[in-house]
Amino acid sequence: MDTLGVMNPRRILFIASEAAPLVKVGGLADVVGALPPALRALGHDVRILLPKYEVIRPELIPIQRTLGPVSIPWQGKSLRVTVQVSTLVGTDVPLYLLDAPEMFAGEAIYYEHNGPGGMRLALERYVFFSWAVGHVLPILNWSPHILHCHDWHTAALPAVLTTSAQPAPVTILTIHNMEGQGKWSPAEIFSWLGLHGDESPLWQLRDQANNLNLLQLGIHGADAVTTVSPTYAKEIVIPEFGAGLETDLASRRGGVMGILNGIDAAHFNPAVDASLHARYDSQSVTVGKLANRRALLRELQLDYGLGPLFGFVGRLTGQKGVDLISAAVPDIVRGGGNLVVLGSGSPDIERAIKQAAADFPGAVRAVVKFDAQLAQRIYAASDFFLMPSRFEPCGLGQMIAMCYGALPIVRDTGGLHDTVSDLREAAGGTGLVFRHSDPQEFRDVIHEALRLYAEVDTMTMARQRGMSQDFSWTRSAQAYGHLYRHVHPTA
Ligand code: ADP
């Protein structure tokens, strides 16, 4: 036992491209920022290794020590890198920053603003990152039992370790979304690394388009592969969800494990949330939400409908099924409801939802921007929260909605399946679930919500059940702790 009384703690190094609050593009950052402190609270020695991007504000990463330098062969030259040691702000998690200014300069993380040419730059950046991690492990003065990689950006690491001399630690790959894979010409990648490509069987893998595919390397090379919900883990072995790597995933001995993400329960708490018009808890949920709804409708200059308020907060992309919401707007309005949509994303989808809202100016509003405070007010004001996603690896919106007493209306997929149960089917239901990405089916579930809203006691009890769910990171950390002990049985 260690000093915290935890049996067999492990040493684990998270290797990732993002970590909140230092550098965030999507939900990956939330996981990498929140899971290590939760694991440390269980007694594991977890540390994080990130690229030292120029965009990270220096005051957030006070440097305690510099390790190295190490010379790394890259594109026929030798690149000098160091590792700077800091602590993840607001936590006790040791943070290693790989400092290679030639590779991590500039405004963007994934070259997301660089148009079509951005993909090559991103590939170079993350192939280099994984390659460099393999070279700096010996200078950390700390030897992890497990390297925990995340998404395609660090999925090449198991392959990199086959070409480095030291005894390789155990590797875990967590897939946060199958959409990003890191595909590129093998010849070019091998020329960057100075490899022939026959150094190990992993380097000889090719995807369906004959590319070297970094996510595929991780799927075959990691000792364990996980994803962010049990249902998404089952879905990604079939073509509809596997994005071309379904056979690779299905062929893994030991399968793919699904562990649900958590949310920051202290932050998403309507009893203390300073961005709300009125604070409330599960006892005062009905009046609290009513006050928030009145205030939000006033803020957005909407008329108060006699039916429920439906809310949506999220990226306006094909994944999120916003077209189903656009098609159901007339049903919501005819049923006396209000609808508030907050999001940004694809210009076509932004235009379509704005048009659908413009047809009913007193009842519906589409706000196209990113606004974390307004998002909280929408969660608090909504009676029903819409997530008609086509696929959803885990999804945070439905969990946040339940913390705020909004009943999620979700498609039966991925993490939505694992976190929401249908009020019509289960006595302890917390929302409404529909099966197919079909406009009529979605309109039917909207009509069910309009009907349900009149049943005040049923609504209140369902809200309270949602608010009492445990979506904490502690629960996720316990599941990862189990996995760490399984892949590395002796500490
Ligand atoms: P994904 O990671 O696929 O974007 P999630 O549901 O897992 O979807 O997480 C999205 C998170 O981002 C939620 O916390 C949601 O509230 C927040 N969010 C998304 N779009 C916006 C926006 N336009 N303004 C404020 N918050 C947003």
Image (tube, rainbow, N blue to C red):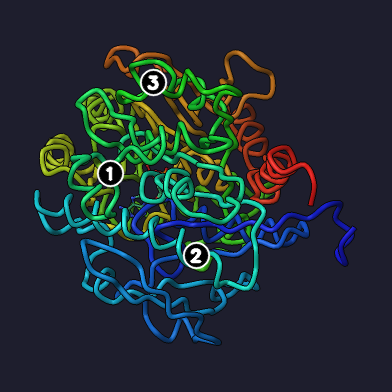
At horizontal 85% and vertical 55% (from top left) the residue drawn is 6
Question: Identity of the amino acid at label 3?
Answer: Glu
The image position of residue 438, as x and y in percent, is 29, 14
At horizontal 47% and vertical 18% (from top left) the residue drawn is 250
The image position of residue 301, as x and y in percent, is 25, 54
* First reached walking from the N terminus: tag 2 or tag 3: 2
User: Secondary structure under badge 2?
Assistant: strand
User: Secondary structure under badge 3?
Assistant: helix
Location of residue 319 (image quadrant): top left
At horizontal 41% and vertical 60% (from top left) the residue drawn is 18
Query: Residue tagged by mark 1?
Result: 196
The residues tagged by marks 1 and 2 sit, at their Cα atoms, a distance apart of: 28 Å
The front one of 216 and 459 is 216
Answer above or below: position of 327 versus 482: above
The image position of residue 370, as x and y in percent, is 29, 58
Answer above or below: position of 465 versus 134: above
Q: Which class describes the residues within 10 Å of circle 1: few (<14), some (14-19), or many (20+)?
A: few
* Circles 1, 3 touching at the beta carbon (< 8 Å): no
Location of residue 377 (image quadrant): bottom left
Question: Identity of the amino acid at label 2?
Answer: Leu
Which mark is nearer the camera, 1 or 2? 1
Question: Identity of the amino acid at label 1?
Answer: His
* Circles 1, 2 touching at the beta carbon (< 8 Å): no
Which mark is nearer the camera, 1 or 3? 1
Q: Is mark 1 within 8 Å of ligand 1?
A: no
The residues tagged by marks 1 and 3 sit, at their Cα atoms, a distance apart of: 28 Å
Residue 453: in sight, yes or no? Answer: no
The image position of residue 333, as x and y in percent, is 27, 30
Query: Residue tagged by mark 3?
Result: 246
Query: Residue tagged by mark 2?
Result: 49
The front one of 489 and 475 is 489
